[in-house]
Image (cartoon, helix red, strand yellow):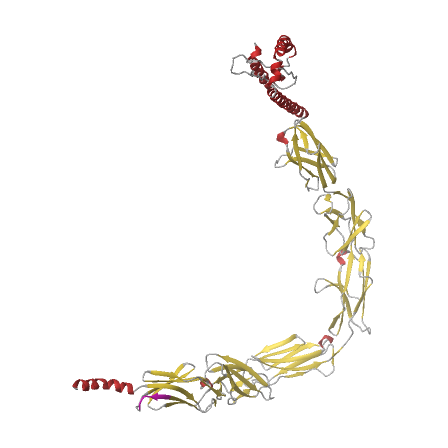
Amino acid sequence: MYFAVLMILLHCPSLKAQDNVITINKVKLTVPSPKVKNGKSIELTCIVDISKSASFQIQHAFSFYKDDSPLYNTTSEQDRARYKIFPARFADSGSYKCSVEASGKSKSSNDLVVQVKGLSQPKLTALKTEVTEGEVVTLRCEEPEEKPPFIFLFYKISRNQQLQEKKKQELKENFASVEFPVEEGDRILHFHCIATVNSAVGFEKSEASNTTLVTVVEPFSHPKLTSKSPWNVTEGDRIDIVCTTILARKYEIEILIQKDRRILNSTRGQNSLTYSAIATVEDNGNYTCKVELGRVSKTTSMNLVVEELFAKPILTPSLTDLDENQRLSLWCHINGSPKANVSIIKRPPKNGTLLKTSSNFTIQVQVNDTGSYVCRAEIKGIIKESNPVQITVYAPVSEPVLSVANLSTEMVLGETLMLRCQSMSGTPPINYTLFRGNRLIHTITVFNNTYAEFRDKQTKLNNLREYRCEASNRHAYAKRSSYKMNITVIAPVRNISFGSSPHGEVEDGGYINFLCIVGEGSLPINFRIFKENEQKPLFNESKMETRVVWQKESFSKQDAGKYFCEASNRARATVRSNLLTVKVILASWQKGFIALFVLAVIAIAASGFWWYWHKKEKGKHPSMEMSGSTAATNSTSEKQASGQNHYTEFYPGPGYIEDSENPVKSADENKGPDHESAEVEYTEVEVSTPDPYKDSGENRHSRIEGSPDAT
């Protein structure tokens, strides 16, 4: 019993532990509204739903996150916790969530996207609130409660309500600075700025910042341009143009007076400037006074009219292009014919050379009289010049010299010939004309003392071409011709062919004729014959013909191979023929010797075959040979007697061939040693064959001596 009580007491803690079991069912994050206006608050509430095995208190650890980054932590026994963001800014937009941990277990809520609408109002400040024309206004726009990146927009509003905008991007700072130049006419300027931001949650634009006022101080007044001259200004009158301005304080200003783009006078550090001159008709026009200080400039303009005292003189020549020693007359005329001091001047030099103080001038011209002539007239100190008249005096051209650019009077057909024609004296421009025979090729005009270069391409073969050139200028009678020059045209070697006789085959020890022919080409032509893979030519000769024949004697087997021909002339272009293969064959006597040898071999073979066949036939008929043995013996004896004499008289020598004897035994072979000799026949053949066939005759005698009847 005590044991049972003890066991119950021991199990009590475990029973208690089993009573404190929990499970987290759900964690939820809520917000009153997912869209919050900038400056308002964001209230996040994290609620946890937990199931427990019994009623007991537990601690909940709440954690808040923004964009997966820890934001706030708290511990509570309640089933919810709150986190408040105030004031809410655009940077607070993002994805929020919370997690709860209790009794070693944890769970997170779903993501909740909260968007803050709008941006806080930026703050604009100016470095200076009072500036001078030409200076710059430095502005700073700041978003102290927002986070970058930003795009700041700055606006300048001038008195005429013109709006000028500048944009500045800032990625790391929450402020940006820009500069606005102060232009002429600016007096009171208004500035404001706006901040914009663009992120993953959207684009937002702030309200306009505070307006900053900047006052502009004018450093100097608008310039005033006046003329001290009379209203009706005539050439010869003095003109005085004055420009003045008023300075707010002493500035280092610059004043300029200009006409069109030409500056007439200028000063620095003064408040007035004067331009004075004796009026001429060229002084008509618009005058401008310009005052500058740094970036500020102010201008004023006026128009001045000057009446003409006398017209511009006119110079008239008798001729503008003259030959040497020809008479030139110049006349100077002024419309209205006022009384004026007139002179005629030649240029160069720049200021001119006075020729005569008169309205007319006559001279017999030379080449050095070439130049520009003017007429100068003066009344009451006003000097006017006429438009210049260009006078050119032409010296006749000298006889031109025709030369070849490469110093050679030979050229290759199809190439371009370069000829130069030049006259060593004569007034340019000079016209050079090239002739081929009587045909005009081309004309070139040269404007300086140099040569004319002609190019003529030779397309047709003509062994001799005749050229000359002519030179002329504007001299009335100058046209000179050069000496005639003969150019030799060389046609390059073309269309080469190569052959032989006999063609392709030569008897051993015989001769062969090689023939090399070219289709066209100027003479002489150099022919060379080579054997393939050999550097040194076998034949080399220059001919006044388009073909060459070369005979090679004692042609042997070592000479067999491939041959080719090369041809060239003064065109310096070598052409090569096709390859010709030449073989060496046996001579006629060699062919006859081999034929006789073959016939002898055939005859020997035929005789041997006949003997073999005859012996075989005798073996088939032994009885017939036995019955006629007696007659055969007598016949044999007679043949031996007569045969010896016949053999001696008609022995053909080395070509003699016989059939061997074949003896036949008697029918009663086992009864006695006597034998019946067989009939021996001789066949005599006379053949003209080499000595090696002696051996067959000697073998025949040995066979006859071993037979029974040979005794």
Give left or right: position of 291 versus 339: left
Q: Is residue 436 magenta?
A: no
Quick check: can you spot residue 679? no
Give left or right: position of 583 versus 442: left
Instruction: Looking at the picture, tell me which residue is in the foreground, 436 or 5.
Output: 5
Q: Residue at x 41, y 81 (%)?
A: 68
Give left or right: position of 219 versus 381: left
Quick check: can you spot residue 579? yes
* Image quarter of the N terminus: bottom left
Instruction: Looking at the picture, tell me which residue is in the foreground, 325 or 691.
Output: 691
List x then y, in percent, for residue 659: 61, 18
Q: In the picture, residue 522 is in which quadrant?
A: top right
Instruction: Looking at the picture, tell me which residue is in the foreground, 527 or 160.
Output: 527
659 above or below 131? Answer: above
Number of callouts in the render?
0
539 above or below 311? Answer: above
Q: In the picture, residue 274 is in which quadrant?
A: bottom right
585 above or below 577? Answer: above
Give left or right: position of 235 versus 593: right
451 above or below 298? Answer: above
* Image quarter of the C terminus: top right
Q: Is residue 50 magenta?
A: yes
List x then y, in percent, for residue 430: 77, 54
List x then y, in percent, for residue 17: 27, 85
List x then y, in percent, for residue 190: 55, 88
Residue stretch rendered in magenta on the structure: 49-54
Instruction: Looking at the picture, tell me which residue is in the foreground, 128 or 409.
Output: 409
Q: Main secondary structure of the magenta part?
A: strand
